[in-house]
Amino acid sequence: MPITLGALVAFVSLVVIAIPFLRRSGAALAARQTSEVERLTALRAFLYDQIGQLQDDHAANTIAEEDYRRQLLELRVGAAETIRQLDQLGYEEEPQDAPVSLTRESLEDEIAALRRAGSRRGSGTGQGSGSDEQ
């Protein structure tokens, strides 16, 4: 009985000593996550602005079609990756000025369509071994 009582007192003491350290690490983790969300939302806003400027340049015919498509694809991929990272952090709010083509639903629809097109292409050629690789 005295050994059990001593072990219990030691365990309770250890927990009491560890609680402040655990709270600090939890607060530090929350602060890091908050700063990461802020960084990613700023990046997303920057990418949206860049897409808007690129579309304005395209409408004004100041950029070649090939350059426009290449740059638009790069910016859209960057925005989609940023949205994915925000989703992983549990942040689901979309900005009010988000381009319609970059909302979660439209990106998910586009990805699904690309996957369907890719699976049709892979099954239509008879080369099934390469379609499983990612």
Image (cartoon, grey):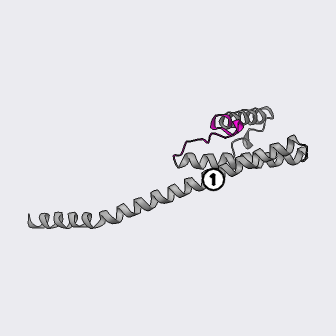
Is residue 38 on the magenta stretch?
Answer: no
Q: Where does residue 34 sit, x and y in percent of width and height?
A: 51, 55
Secondary structure of residue under mark 1: helix
Farthest left residue in view: 1
Total labels: the figure holds: 1
The x and y percentages for residue 6 are: 14, 67
* Drawn side of residue 60 relative to residue 25, left or right: right
Residue highlighted by disc 1:
42
Residue at point 78%, 34% (across, down) = 121
Q: Residue at x 38, y 63 (%)?
A: 24
Depicted 108 relative to depicted 37: above or below: above
Q: Would you identify the image quadrant in which residue 97 lies?
A: top right
Give the left or right position of residue 33, taking residue 69 as reference.
Answer: left
**Vertical side of 120 occupied by 80: above or below:** below
| Residue appearing at x 56%, y 45% in the figure | 87
Is 56 or 2 nearer to us in this picture?
Answer: 56
Q: Tell me the kind of residue under disc 1.
A: Ala
Q: Which residues are magenta?
A: 90-106
Who's the residue at 75% across and 36% down the image?
A: 118
**Residue 81 visible in rendering:** yes
Position of the N terminus, as image quadrant, is bottom left
Asked whether residue 134 appears in the rendered view, the answer is no
Residue 95: horizontal and vertical position, in percent? 61, 42
Q: Picture coordinates of residue 104 (x, y %)?
A: 63, 38
Residue in the foreground of this view, choosing between 3 and 49: 49
Nearest to the observer: residue 47 or residue 5: 47
Mostly what secondary structure, the magenta segment? loop
Give the crowd class for mark 1: few <14, some 14-19, many >=20 residues within 10 Å. few
Left or right of residue 16: residue 134: right
